Amino acid sequence: MNVCQKDVVLLPYPFSDFEGEKVRPAIVVSNNDLNMKSEDCVMVPLTGVIKDESYSVLIKQENLAFGKLIKPSRARADKILAVDKSIIILRIGAINDRTFEEIKSEIGKIF
């Protein structure tokens, strides 16, 4: 599947111990040049646990440029992962520019 930066997609996202996986939404953070050239893309998962956590950004329906979010979620910049685009199940929307800048800022704080 072709993806673009800021897309919100559904995919089987692995647990951090790689012992299992769960279908969950994630946001594509890799740039479109990489997204076109590589079989992989870089994502941050969304979680329905919305308590204020370090390195996370609250995502609500109004943070989407288009699409539908089932419930408020948090983008977890501390769980960034490269994944094979072939496992993406569905594109469900895209976040707006302001929200993407917030996520990039949280990713930058990790380094």
Image (cartoon, rainbow, N blue to C red):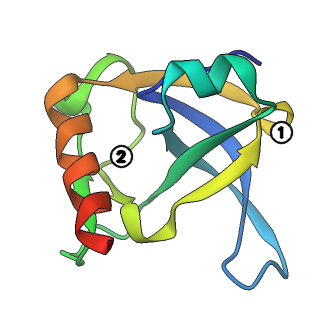
| Residue 56 falls left or right of residue 83 | left
Q: Which mark is residue 87?
A: 1
Q: Residue at x 45, y 21 (%)?
A: 93
Q: Residue at x 23, y 56 (%)?
A: 57
Q: Label 2: which residue?
A: 71
Are there few (<14), some (14-19), or many (20+) residues within 10 Å of tag 1?
Answer: few
| Residue 93 falls left or right of residue 20 | left
Q: Nearer the viewer, mark 1 or mark 2?
A: 1
Residue 109 placement: quadrant: bottom left
Sequence-wise first label, 1 or 2: 2
Quadrant holding the N terminus: top right
Amino acid type, residue under disc 2 in the picture: Lys
Q: Position of residue 45 (x, y in %)?
A: 51, 55
Task: Please tell me whether residue 61 is drawn above or below residue 52 in the rendered image.
Answer: above
Task: Please tell me whether residue 35 is drawn above or below residue 104 in the rendered image.
Answer: above
Residue 3 placement: quadrant: top right
Q: Residue at x 78, y 67 (%)?
A: 21
Task: Please tell me whether residue 29 is drawn above or below residue 37 in the rendered image.
Answer: below
Quadrant holding the C terminus: bottom left
18 or 10: which is nearer to us?
18
Amino acid type, residue under disc 1 in the picture: Ile
Are there few (<14), some (14-19), or many (20+) residues within 10 Å of tag 2?
Answer: few
Q: Secondary structure at mark 2?
A: loop
Q: Position of residue 53 (x, y in %)?
A: 24, 77
62 or 44: which is nearer to us?
44
